[in-house]
Amino acid sequence: MANVNIGITEKNRQAVAGALNQVLADEHILYNKTRSYHWNVEGPSFMELHKLYEEQYTVLAEIIDEVAERIRTVGHFAEGRLKELLKLATLDEPQVPTRFEKQIPNLDADHETIINNLRKLIKDFDEKYKDIGSSDFLTGLLKQHEKMAWMLRSYVG
């Protein structure tokens, strides 16, 4: 890998990349779960939820790409092996419920887990690792997850 001189020590860039790889893993779990729910949802609001889940997994696919590119930006490699992503992830992959009454709270809880993790990392990246670029990047992700969680919560009232 080429020498990276972006004003952040190698030790700090390595720590940021490690944390971002964990974020990447959780984004993959949430993407796969949302896509699975899109395929398997049943009930009177099937079409609405089918479309909502598609909108959300499309956003999550973009987020996955952006997180991986941010890891490369700080000079490290993004994890892409599913086996390793599962080891890094904090989110769980339970059995797929087909009823939206279980799907929506499950997705909302995952978004909230990611949101809370991002809040901590935003501060750590800025203050502890002196990486305001990655901190700012995570602020954008935080806003996207907050909006998706709000949409899910609003659906069930």
Image: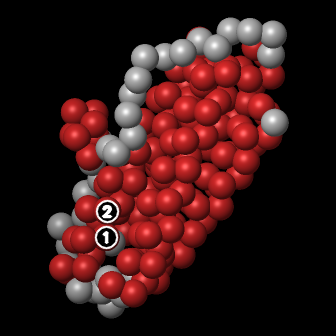
Tell whether label 1 touches label 2 (CB within 8 Å): yes
Frontmost residue, 56 versus 155: 155
Label 2 sits on residue: 19
Secondary element at image label 2? helix
Frontmost residue, 77 versus 101: 101
> Which quadrant of the figure contains the N terminus?
bottom left
**Number of other residues with Cα within 10 Å of mark 1, as a class: few under 14, some 14 to 19, many 20 or more:** many
Q: Residue at x 57, y 69 (%)?
A: 139
Q: Residue at x 50, y 60 (%)?
A: 116
Identified by mark 1, the residue type is: Val
Residue 22 is situated, as x and y percent measured from the top left of the image, at: 32, 53
User: For the view shown, which residue lies furthest in the bottom direction?
Assistant: 7
Vertical position of residue 44 compared to residue 118: above or below: above
Identified by mark 2, the residue type is: Ala
Label 1 sits on residue: 16
Residue 85 seen in the current view: yes
